[in-house]
Amino acid sequence: MKVSLECAHCLLERAINQVRIATDDPELQMKVITAMMKFLGENYAGNSVPSHIGTDRDLLVQRMTGKDPYKDLKYESNVMALNILPELLQLVDEAKDSRSKFRTATLIAAAANAIEFDVTGQDFSLDELRDILDNVEADLAIDQVDELQKLCENAKEVLFLHDNAGEVVLDMILIREIKRLGPKVIAVVKGGPVLNDATMVDADEVSLAEYADEVIDTGAPAIGVN
């Protein structure tokens, strides 16, 4: 995937949002954004990869402010998700058969993708997750849940790549159902802070190891998998 015209706006806007969260110092804020504009001017081109530039952007903000801008927000989203985890586990357990249980767990994990911060047009409130969960079945555009279940039934090992903090909690419900089908599940989080993605810190906070057979990281604080 290469950058498009809109990527420039998104990259800079998210940098500004991160700087505002990371520091209240106007002078430091200006220094970071000035450095960010210089970086984008030197590295933004038609063949640039958004995830690569986004990673460098996040690391620049962290390096200059000395903070992970999303640290507190990630903690809040983990707490929120943990608070509703018991009732969601019960919802899955009350499903009539293994197919229904797997489907419910998969839809919960799909709904959890809504946990995202600072994306234009996707202003996310932590309080909105319940509403999203209530409507996920109707909002599903592509339904390949049965195909996924068959793949898991025939697999010996599943590599589960986690995305955001908070979301990782609801992923644990699906991990439980995948393991019930037989395969070993290896959970993978990011190797360091980037965006609001889950790291080993988040994995420990939410007790991911109690659900997955093994928890590892990608080895780098990078968007995507390097």
Image (spheres, rainbow, N blue to C red):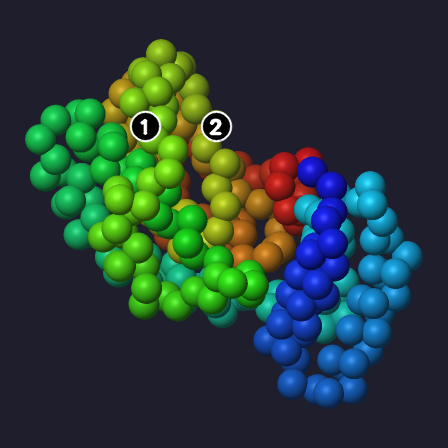
Q: Residue at x 31, y 36 (%)?
A: 106
Q: Quadrant of the N terminus?
A: top right
What x and y, as percent, mark residue 180? 25, 25
Q: Residue 43: where, in percent of width, then height?
A: 86, 53
Side (left or right) of 196 relative to 106: right
Q: Residue at left 40%, top 62%? A: 77
Q: Return the residue found at the far top.
A: 154
Residue 218 occupies which quadrant of the picture? top right
Question: Is 133 placed above or below 10 here?
Answer: above
In the rendered structure, the answer to whether residue 82 lies left or right of residue 166 reads left
**Depth check, front residue: 69 or 214:** 69
In percent of width and height, residue 19 lies at 67, 74
Residue at the (66%, 61%) spot, across then down: 10
User: Dot 2: within a 10 Å radius of its alpha carbon, few (fewer than 14), some, or many (20 or more) residues?
Assistant: few
Q: Say whether disc 2 or disc 1 marks the residue closer to the N-terminus.
A: 1
Give the camera-side residue of 3 and 75: 3
Q: Identify the amino acid type marked 1.
A: Val
Instruction: Determine whether 66 is above or below 196 in the image.
Output: below
Q: Residue 145 carries which label?
A: 1
Of tags 2 and 1, the one toward the viewer is 1
Query: Is residue 160 in view from this perspective?
Result: yes
What residue is drawn where x is 48% and y is 58%?
116
Q: Which residue in the protein does label 2 denote? A: 159
Residue 18 falls in which quadrant of the image?
bottom right
Please rate how many residues cluster around mark 1, counting C-alpha atoms within 10 Å: few if below 14, some from 14 to 19, many from 20. some
Q: How far apart in space, not on screen, are marks 2 and 1 (Cα)? A: 17 Å
Q: Which of 155 and 135 is in front in this view?
A: 135
From the viewer's perspective, is residue 117 above or below residue 23?
A: above
Q: Where is residue 195 in the image (x, y as percent from the top left)?
A: 59, 57
Question: Tag 2's secondary structure?
Answer: strand
